[in-house]
Image: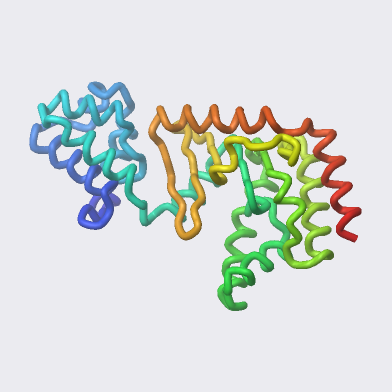
Amino acid sequence: MGKADRLDPDHNPWHWLAVDLRIWRIERNLSQARLAEILGVDDSTVSNYESGTSKVPERKAEILDQLWHTRGHFVRIRRYAESMHDPDWRRQNIEYEAKASVIRTYESLWVPGLIQTEGYARAGFDSAGIGKPEADELWERRLARQAILDGPNPPQLYVLLDQAVITRQVGGREVMREQLAGLLKVADWPHAMVRIIPWEAGAHMGQDGSFKLMTVERGNVVYIEAAIEGRLITDPTKLTDMGLQWERIGARALPEPLTRRLIADQMETTR
């Protein structure tokens, strides 16, 4: 059974779009190669669309509607899917993260999971009421995610943090000092950058919430955090908007040397 046969169009709108694409293509006796030519992509991309591995961009959905005179059918499904919670968001986020060549993240409340120490992560699990067996499993998963930063070809990692992240004491003084030391270590990596948005910056666009932009081979994707569930965005227009938002937040951040000094000063305060 292939990936396309395992899709669940009744419960996942992205799968619905993938299944409809395949049905309409087959009913019109179009090969994947011919449809790829019409859409301006390669054969494997069409295969990925139909298997649900890749999401159909809005512009491609518009071309499908024009091609088959479907009066906005594919665009409507896609917009509906964008507005809905994707049940695969957690798995897809980790997969994108592992494949990313560049990761740009902004965090308003927590140190990003990719660079959390064990003590800090476990303190976070404890604050959420998570018991030890589940916390052990979650930490092992997080550790596996962090392995990409120690590999032979780690992604470029650009981290923007609100000052609240380093001043809010998580897990006690010893745990927080260890995490702050970890941030300084990351800041010294040749493939990483850490910058703090200080209190003095005042109100800024990042106060709307945390998010992460990932550059992968097939393009870019944004992961937006929420209290219960996350959301992945691949729409080109929204990706551009989020990229500009990240840049504007970064414009309010301290330079790297001053960021290191602020973190070091906070370590002294946390003694």
Front residue of this view, candidates 271 and 186: 271
Q: Is residue 76 above or below residue 171?
A: above
Name the quarter where the C terminus is drawn.
bottom right
In the figure, residue 210 lies in which quadrant?
Answer: top right
Instruction: Measuring from the top left, give residue 7's x and y in whole percent.
Output: 26, 53
Q: Residue at x 84, y 35 (%)?
A: 258
**Observer able to see residue 152:** yes
Q: Residue at x 50, y 33 (%)?
A: 242
Q: Is residue 256 left or right of residue 136?
A: right
Above or below residue 65? Residue 162 is below
Looking at this view, is 155 or 114 the one in front? 114
Vertical placement of residue 143 versus 45, above or below? below
Question: Which residue is painted at 16% across and 24% down in the image?
Answer: 66
Q: Is residue 262 left or right of residue 20?
A: right
The answer to whether 127 appears left or right of 264 in the picture is left
Is residue 211 visible to the viewer in this orientation of the structure? Answer: no
- Which of the two residues, 108 or 124, is positioned nearer the viewer here? 108
The image shows residue 195 at horizontal and vertical percentages of 73, 37
How far across and how far down the image is residue 62, in percent? Answer: 23, 27
